[in-house]
Image: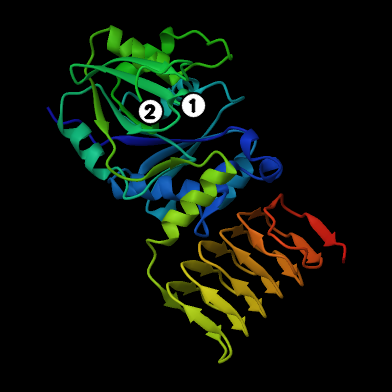
Amino acid sequence: MPKENPKGLILSGGKGERLRPFTYTGAKQLVPIANKPVLFYAIEDLVGCGITDIGIVVGDTRAQVEKAVGDGTRFGARVTYIEQEAPLGIAHAVKIAADFLAGHPFVLYLGDNLVLGGVARFVQRFRGDSSNCWLLLKRVNTPESFGVAELVDGRVARVVEKPRRPASDLAVIGVYMFDHHVFEAVDQLRPSARGELEITDTIQYLIDKGLHVQTEVLDRYWIDTGKMDDILEANHVVLQTLTPANQGQVDERTRVYEPVILEKGARVVNSVLRGPLLIGQDTEVIDSYVAPFTSISHHCRLKGVRVGGSIILEHTSIEDIHWPIEHSLIGRYVTLRGGQAVGGSYSLTLGDHSQIEMPGA
């Protein structure tokens, strides 16, 4: 019997410890991929599945998330915010969202996960079958870093959180689908050794009770953007999917190698742009070389800079840096100036409002 239309539950708490110092002043789910917060991809994916009643679980960065997302109208959704007192686990987030979910089937989406191409096909199958839970799996090189599914005769028999000796390379990714049986499961849980209510224990409870837990190995790109390298990789991948467009101004001395996106008000003078790359609204690029896989947010200024494979957030100024900036994550309202060419290149992780004057040679 088909299920009623699911609700959505997105987790946007957590402290982003693996992204420090970048996340000392900002929510990790608001770090942009191709100039769009990764959280927005999750919201848009759910709306694309026909899910418009969405709860967002928030913590210390609630004010930032609410300011960015609003009431959901801009996405065609209705958003309810659910306060989590501390990062006590994914299953804890489900437990405190019980009133919002009201027994409905739902899609649980970790707000720092990115699935290129979305999950609409899988949600449609969940809605139309008799399963109590759907898990999306992905083969990974480091399964010990994830929850891992063990399959027996094609069915999931066990799910283990970050096992020392993984029984498979099938990671459980951060998109789950549950019916009302999950609320019984989370009510029975006890905190793990790390003090959290684990979603893997929740799933194992459903399996042990003989409920129908369905799995599918994901056939598309997925990444958990919890670390800087992962964010830059996701930026690299997403930039390759965007359609070139020019709403800015490019002078006759500038050379452009597509695909390049210039947003409204962007201005490029005497520079080289080698795509794929994205330059945001009202950003200036002067006397600079911007290499592939770079996204620069709005209201930035780059002058006398070589940069590539990097993400630069809004209202940042980088001027007269005579060595290349590569594989870097640079926050909002950063000022970076000076320095002489010394050979090689530099990788930077700078939090919001950093001010650095590089010494000359």
Q: Is residue 70 visible?
A: no
Quarter of the picture containing the N terminus is top left
Which amino acid is tagged 1? Ser
Q: In this picture, is 96 found above or below 79? A: above
Label pair 2/1, CB-CB below 8 angstroms: yes
Q: Residue at x 58, y 70 (%)?
A: 290
Question: Dot 2, how many residues are within 10 Å of its Cα: few (below 14), some (14-19), or many (20+)?
Answer: many
In front of the other: 325 or 120: 325
Quarter of the picture containing the C terminus is bottom right
Q: Which mark is residue 171?
A: 2
Rendering coords of residue 34 (x, y %)? 49, 59
Q: Which mark is residue 145?
A: 1
Q: In this picture, is 131 found above or below 242? A: above
Q: Residue at x 71, y 75 (%)?
A: 303
Q: Is 247 displayed left or right of 108 in the figure?
A: right
User: Which image quarter: residue 106?
Assistant: top left
Which amino acid is tagged 2? Ala
Task: Name the element at disc 2.
Answer: strand
Task: Name the element at disc 1.
Answer: helix
Q: Residue furthest bottom?
A: 252
